[in-house]
Image (cartoon, grey):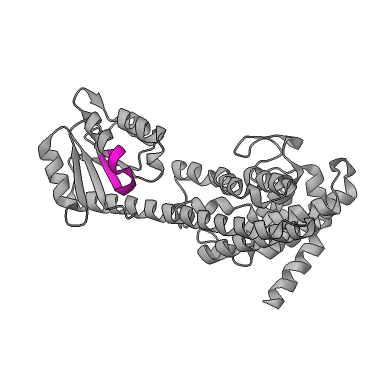
Amino acid sequence: MERRKILIVDDLESNRLILAEIFQKDYQILQAEGTVSALQLLKTYNGEMAAVLLDWHLSGEDGSKVLEVMKAKDWMAHIPVLIVTAEHSAEVEKKCIQMGASDLIRKPYDADVVKNRVYNSISLYQHKNQMEEKVQEQSQILRKQYSVMKVQAEKLKKANEKMIDIICNILERNYPEFLDNVQIAREISRIIGKKVQQNYPEYKLTDADVEVIAELSSLRDIGKLLISDHVLYKPAKLTKEEAEYMKSHTAKGCEIMKMMKDLQTPEYHRVSMEICLYHHERYDGRGYPEGLKGDEIPISAQIVSVVDAYHALISERVYKRSYSREDAYYMILGGECGIFSPKIMECFRMSRKEMEEIDTDMEEDA
């Protein structure tokens, strides 16, 4: 259902009319003078709501009650809320953002600024909602494929591989930064994984384990499908809030993989969750999202984390140039990209020649 309604919540009719005038040509305007009427309208029309403009100072209370209920009912996942306030204190702004507000509009406001901010928020949420729908559609497709292919173990293995390829195609089609990323990451993960298997038997990696890690390494950033392009492709340093939001791609990746649990063998699902969630953890405990230390980090994620760091360095991004393979190699050994396990670093050293040969071979093939 197309979202074509904007709810304006303000206890002063004059304020509501001013805001309504800005948007009435493009949207159906709903008005509420307090928390009770606002929540009733949201309950009835939340599926059609494009945005909520919420005055922070309603009669006898602030707007937090509306935000609390919207968050509890998961409406804020699909509806941007912009707080309208004359407050200029950092405390109010911090509280609003922490409660899930998309933006703040300061009084007195300029009509064009208000319009642009609201339309930008609506556009970002529309994109997010569309991406979530795409993921759900792909999950349904993959579920149907799995029901046909689960007769034998070998067929299930092929279904796993096919699922990964489809997801990688989605990533590559929607995000150019993933082009040429998939196969290189797989091959480097396979090389380092084999070195771990050969030199550190305490991890008990089998040939099958190494192949699973290599295949699933390409899904480490699948959570970025649910990250706003405004942040993902920002050609400048991220703000503190944007950086924290970007970090959420680890948890968002797990959310996607949970939807595909029935399409995977238990082993594939376990390793895919480990890689998505923990590939930014660091051996010294200074990574995210959980700050795991040492071998608290699953070996699958330890292997993929160094692969991710190396490939990020040699790849060009909108916010940075690419480094040479030699520079990238020494930057990782020098600790410029975080602290990795000494065992993983030893395997990384032993893999240098093979990594460079594989990268070169792939470029020549391309």
Q: In the image, is 128 to the left or to the right of 213?
A: left
| Farthest residue, direction left | 14
Residue closer to the observer: 110 or 35: 35
Task: Relative to 73, say whether 166 is above or below.
Answer: below
Query: Does the image show residue 134?
Result: yes
Residue located 55% across and 50% down the image: 223
Left or right: where does residue 253 sit relative to residue 104? right
Q: Could you say which quadrant of the image residue 292 lies in?
A: top right
Question: Camera-side residue: 305 or 129?
Answer: 129
Task: Give the magenta range.
Answer: 42-53
- Give the percent coordinates (x, y) of residue 145: 63, 60
Measured from the top left, where is residue 181 in percent x and y? Answer: 64, 63
Instruction: Residue 184 in the image: state x and y as whole percent.
Output: 70, 64
Quarter of the image where one finds residue 325: bottom right
Q: Residue at position x 74%, y 52% from top?
A: 213
Residue 245 belongs to the span the image colors magenta: no
* Quadrant location of the N terminus in the rendered image: bottom left
